[in-house]
Amino acid sequence: MAGTTANGSTSYPVTVRIDDMGELLPGMNATAKIPTASVKNVLALPNAALVRGSYVLVTKDSPSAANADPDMTAPEGYVYVPVKIVVSDDDYTQIISGVTGSEFGWAAFIAGAFTSAVPGIIVHIILIPVLVMSLQKAGFLKTEPCAA
């Protein structure tokens, strides 16, 4: 199938049959997810458990800890293990080597969240108000009372 490339995006002609139109009317836009790969009976981790794209946190006493990357500093009691990934979607990533499925529990997931997501959230909570106040002070952002 030949695609058409314009402005850095490639489009492919597709015919879609919609059995239940619901509230969709002619001329409206829609978003569709088209699976390009599917796997079953594999080790799949939530994307949030991956750190720097291809590492996961495991406890120091887990069997996979022997594969730990000595150059990465992990939270107390944990090590970072490099993993080989294959298929990924918006939610999960398939792992084919580096760890086994029996090593993951909530503790590792939470530790990963605290080392990757929480610092970013805290920065946003602090940075956004400071940025808004700075823009207001400099006269670049004017605020008006909101009418109810």
Image (tube, grey):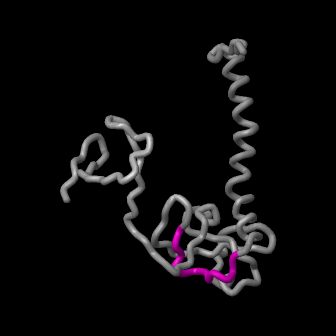
Residue at the extreme bottom: 63
Q: In the image, is 11 to the left or to the right of 67? A: left
Task: Please provide percent x and percent y for residue 87.
Answer: 46, 70
92 up-or-down from 7: above or below: below
Q: In the image, is 79 to the left or to the right of 9? A: right
| Count of numbered badges drawn on the protein | 0
Residue at the extreme left: 2
For the point 44% across and 40% down, the residue is 23
Viewer-closest of 118 and 22:
22
Q: Within the magenta stretch, is there residue 84?
A: no
Task: Please provide percent x and percent y for residue 52.
Answer: 59, 62
Region of the chain picked out in magenta, as a range: 93-104
Viewer-closest of 120 and 37:
37
63 up-or-down from 121: above or below: below
- In the rendered image, the quadrant that contains the N terminus is bottom left
- In the rendered image, the quadrant that contains the C terminus is top right
For the point 58% across and 63% down, the residue is 47
For the point 55% across and 68% down, the residue is 54
Task: Please provide percent x and percent y for residue 95.
Answer: 54, 75
Viewer-closest of 101 and 29:
29
Q: Within the magenta stretch, is there residue 103?
A: yes
79 up-or-down from 137: above or below: below
Task: Please provide percent x and percent y for residue 27.
Answer: 32, 35
Residue at the extreme right: 76
Q: In which quarter of the image is residue 124?
A: top right
For the point 71% across and 67% down, the residue is 109
